[in-house]
Image: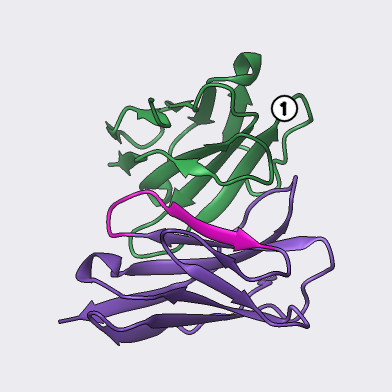
Amino acid sequence: DAKTTQPTSMDCAEGRAANLPCNHSTISGNEYVYWYRQIHSQGPQYIIHGLKNNETNEMASLIITEDRKSSTLILPHATLRDTAVYYCIVRVGDNDMRFGAGTRLTVKP
Amino acid sequence: GAGVSQSPSNKVTEKGKDVELRCDPISGHTALYWYRQSLGQGLEFLIYFQGNSAPDKSGLPSDRFSAERTGGSVSTLTIQRTQQEDSAVYLCASSLWGDTEAFFGQGTRLTVV
């Protein structure tokens, strides 16, 4: 039972912002939104997470809608090294962490 | 500091044999996860350890799979009577607490021939 819905694939031009959407319409009040990415042949890498406020770190920004039913991960200036599968996960803090199919982002020169 | 370490990095085994995969989490991390990733597929959750709580084993695909975590640190995933469909990369991750960012190892590539 997938808790999130993401597009299968997306393209982005190098240097432009990559905006990756995630739908989590059944999210409950105590569930956080997490984003990870997996570059080919590597283990997944944590990017960012949030509850209801927008968050920003050195890698990305996370925009969560007011009703918390969807969110967008923003990579402000995508590079070729950002080509990866991006996973959006919702989870209660002290609980297992399950990944969906994710979005395959391809950054093109 | 050291990250999550998994061993071996590669393992080839004959069908029917048992295998043990090891995960050394980051020191002090209370949460530990195991996943399986078949070629070209997503991450399949297997098992989750959190502190001294009973592990969440709901993702283990069959009773041939088991895992333990000794002393709240090192974890071993055991697959008995391996089958060809067990061939995959097995990934381990740990986090300081259940709700903090998880750090992944590089995985063990298991090939059953």
Q: How many marks?
A: 1
Q: Residues within 10 Å of mark 1 (few under 14, many from 20)?
A: some
**Depth order, front residue of B100/B40:** B100
Q: Which quarter of the rendering shows the N terminus of chain A?
A: bottom right
| Location of residue B104 with respect to A55 vertically, above or below | above
Residue A19 seen by the camera:
yes
Which hue belongs to chain A? purple
Question: Could you tell me the amino acid type at mark 1?
Answer: Gly
Q: Which residues are magenta?
A: A39-50
Q: Is residue B64 above or below residue A69?
A: above
Tell whether A26 sits left or right of B113.
Answer: right
* Residue at the disc numbered 1: B51
The image position of residue B77, as x and y in percent, is 52, 30
Q: Is residue A75 left or right of residue A96?
A: left
Who is closer to the viewer here, B35 or A47? Answer: A47
Residue at figure coordinates x 57%, y 20% from the top left = B73
Instruction: Choose top left, top right, bottom left or bottom right for residue B108.
Output: top left
Q: Residue furthest top?
A: B71
Residue B99 at what x, y percent from top left? 68, 46
Residue A42 percent location from the top left of the image? 31, 50
Circle 1 SS class: loop
Which chain is green in the rendering?
B
